Image (spheres, grey):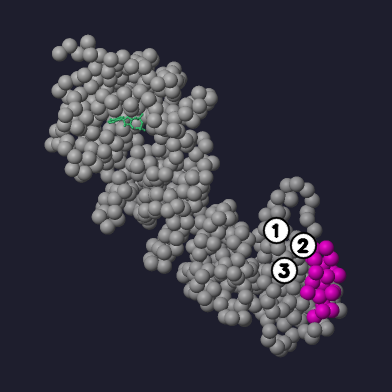
């Protein structure tokens, strides 16, 4: 038969021609995506064939299994992508590869035409992925044979400009074969190693076998799309190694599906080690975004909040709209919705794990607590859920044991209204702290916070389960007991306080009689109710660079039952000079406990003088 005489010449629809003009003449950096687009078309065709098969349709060459094969010919500068899917009839070729049926395309065209650096990577999302072939090919030939038994094959050829030709083609196997004669500057795509890398990157999880020059490539399955109870532990781990580039087993794994408000399939992992503290610098989220198993964006930005950047894995959503572009993707309400659903689900998962397996959770916490705290401080949305995940040592638990805020609240006696927290360096310092004394006496539990970030965490969290979080140094608690034996009378104590203020002058704000001290002679308390000693330290270090010293901003509280205080009262009349020196030392000691004595030189000179005096007396 003379095929040439049967060759038909067709024009592209105006929009397609416009699209092709842009695609052919612009310099795109991510040209390689044409491989993804053509393979994903092939996979769709295989999927549709499977559907026809299961619906009982009669299929041409039904013994040929659906699959995709890619072949390269370096010498000829060609690449061919073939599938054994459902193929196209003459009518379908005209309809599908010459006109645009998709509504999002116009918007895409507009965007492509306007952008200085158009984002062609999303071409497939707009239902025009096929045309990306013309970014790299000077001529594209498509051979297609429909699955319908009575059909015949057709050959479609185009150079992009001016239309395409259609001619009958006999003896074709079922499916579609697309050959690209590559442009001079795109010959690299006829190199097997280049093509292999691209297929691995974008198409590793395509659910049909992909062969490159006869070698099977995609052996790791898209297990996120399978049902959980069919998947073996080793399969999960193998998958994690593949997507996480980490040879250790993950600490946690969350595999879930959701149908509302969005269709989501997600498989997320927490690496056992925190790569950020391993000195690798700020890590980047490694959660890849897929749409029906084809990669849309690797390390998708905005899919999770920044403070969950340690997550690795896959999110697959069918709900990604057609008119999404990489720049605007971060702003879309869809992405925000995805972000909220995924984050809430992950935090709920952590909460469940913390109950189910305390030991594993605490290992996770040890590695990742800073990320959770970062979340509390920077992200209002998930504050409550994050608060539940915090763990601290506490005065009623032995060293090394951690409690949640929820368990702390359960243990609170009815008369206790606040959650008490003590910021401190370590367990021993906490238990020796004068700020802890009143709690020990009143038998109120105190959380010991050893991480410098905790101060901001407490401040931002503010309450938990309706109970205010209170720093121990700010707590207004009194020892309700009767006066201790040997303590100064109220009158004597008040008069000593007055004398102290007169003698210490500007070094201190107010001097008061304390109701919270048991073993310590004195303590300093910040005069500003909302300022804590560590915040003060920080401000001071900033101020020092900028200007003169700040005025004293702390008050001194004295313990009227402590023998140092009672003796001071006893000698201050007869030996004012010694008494003043001791008073100054008491203040400095209290500052040391609060971590507020920066320059100890004056204090040491005074202390040495005092010691000399003690020794000369004893002699
Ligand atoms: P999309 O695939 O997003 O619909 P394309 O421009 O890539 O957009 O393809 C247009 C249409 O051409 C497809 O919807 C499909 O019907 C048809 N098509 C493309 N490639 C193939 C193929 N390999 N086998 C069968 N049909 C195909």
Residue of label 3? 524
Residue stretch in magenta: 493-512
Residue 140 position within the rendered picture, expressed as x and y whole percent measured from the top left = 30, 19
Residue on which disc 1 sits:
536
Residue 130: percent from left, percent from top: 35, 27
Q: Quadrant of ligand 1?
A: top left
Q: Which residue is mark 2?
A: 553
Label whose residue precedes the other's in the sequence (3 or 2) = 3
3D distance between C-alphas at marks 1 and 2: 9 Å
Residue 526: x and y in percent read 73, 65
Split into 4 quadrants, where in the image is the N terminus? Answer: top left
Identify which residue is drawn at 37% across, 29% down: 129
Q: CB atoms at circles 1 and 2 under 8 Å apart?
A: yes
For image coordinates 44% across by 63% down, the residue present is 351
| Secondary structure predominantly adopted by residues drawn in magenta | helix
Task: Check disc 1: other Cα within 10 Å, few if <14, some if 14-19, many if 20+.
Answer: some
Q: Relative to 135, is 71 on the left or the right?
A: left
């Amino acid at each position: 038969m003379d095929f040439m005489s049967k060759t038909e010449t067709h024009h592209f629809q105006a929009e397609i021609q416009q699209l092709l003009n842009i695609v052919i003449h612009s310099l795109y950096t991510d040209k390689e995506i044409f491989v993804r687009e053509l393979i994903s078309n092939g996979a769709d065709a295989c999927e549709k064939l499977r559907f026809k098969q299961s619906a009982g349709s009669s299929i041409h060459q039904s013994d040929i299994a659906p699959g995709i094969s890619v072949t390269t010919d370096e010498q000829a500068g060609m690449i061919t992508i073939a599938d054994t899917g459902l193929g196209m009839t003459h009518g379908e070729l005209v309809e599908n590869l010459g006109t645009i049926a998709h509504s999002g395309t116009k918007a895409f065209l507009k965007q492509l035409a306007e952008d200085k650096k158009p984002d062609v990577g999303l071409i497939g999302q707009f239902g025009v992925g096929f045309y990306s072939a013309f970014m790299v090919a000077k001529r594209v030939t498509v051979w297609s044979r429909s699955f319908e038994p009575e059909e015949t094959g057709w050959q479609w050829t185009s150079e992009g400009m001016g239309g395409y030709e259609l001619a009958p083609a006999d003896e074709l196997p079922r499916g579609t074969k697309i050959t690209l004669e590559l442009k001079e500057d795109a010959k690299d795509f006829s190199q097997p190693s280049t093509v292999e890398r691209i297929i691995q990157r974008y198409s590793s999880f395509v659910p049909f076998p992909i062969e490159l020059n006869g070698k099977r490539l995609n052996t790791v399955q898209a297990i996120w799309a399978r049902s959980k109870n069919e998947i073996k532990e080793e399969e999960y781990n193998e998958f994690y190694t593949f997507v996480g580039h980490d040879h250790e087993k993950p600490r946690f794994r969350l595999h879930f599906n959701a149908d509302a408000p969005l269709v989501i399939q997600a498989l997320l992992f927490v690496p056992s080690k925190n790569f950020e503290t391993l000195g690798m610098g700020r890590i980047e989220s490694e959660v890849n975004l897929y749409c029906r198993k084809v990669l849309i964006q690797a390390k998708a930005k905005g899919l999770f909040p920044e403070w969950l950047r340690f997550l690795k894995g896959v999110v697959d959503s069918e709900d990604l709209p057609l008119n999404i572009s990489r720049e605007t993707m971060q702003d879309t309400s869809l992405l925000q919705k995805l972000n909220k659903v995924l984050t809430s689900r992950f935090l709920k998962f952590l909460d469940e794990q913390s109950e189910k397996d305390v030991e594993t959770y605490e290992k996770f916490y040890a590695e990742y607590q800073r990320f959770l705290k970062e979340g509390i401080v920077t992200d209002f949305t998930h504050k409550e859920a994050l608060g539940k995940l915090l763990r601290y040592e506490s005065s009623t638990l032995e060293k090394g044991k951690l409690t949640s805020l929820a368990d702390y609240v359960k243990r609170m006696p009815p008369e206790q209204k606040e959650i008490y927290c003590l910021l401190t360096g370590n367990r021993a310092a906490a238990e020796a702290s004068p700020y802890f004394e009143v709690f020990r006496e009143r038998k109120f539990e105190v959380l010991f916070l050893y991480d410098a970030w905790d101060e901001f965490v407490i401040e931002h969290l503010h309450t938990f389960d309706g109970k205010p979080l209170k720093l121990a140094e700010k707590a207004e608690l009194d020892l309700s007991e009767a006066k201790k034996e040997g303590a100064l009378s109220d009158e004597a104590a008040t008069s000593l306080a007055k004398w102290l203020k007169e003698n210490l002058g500007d070094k201190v704000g107010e001097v008061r009689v304390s109701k919270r001290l048991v073993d310590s002679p004195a303590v300093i308390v910040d005069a500003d109710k909302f300022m804590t000693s560590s915040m003060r330290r920080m401000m001071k270090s900033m101020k020092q660079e900028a200007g003169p010293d700040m005025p004293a901003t702390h008050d001194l509280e004295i313990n009227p039952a402590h023998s140092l205080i009672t003796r001071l009262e006893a000698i201050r009349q007869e030996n004012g000079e010694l008494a003043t020196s001791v008073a100054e030392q008491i203040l400095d000691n209290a500052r040391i406990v609060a971590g507020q004595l920066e320059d100890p030189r004056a204090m040491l000179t005074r202390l040495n003088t005092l010691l000399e005096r003690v020794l000369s007396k004893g002699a």
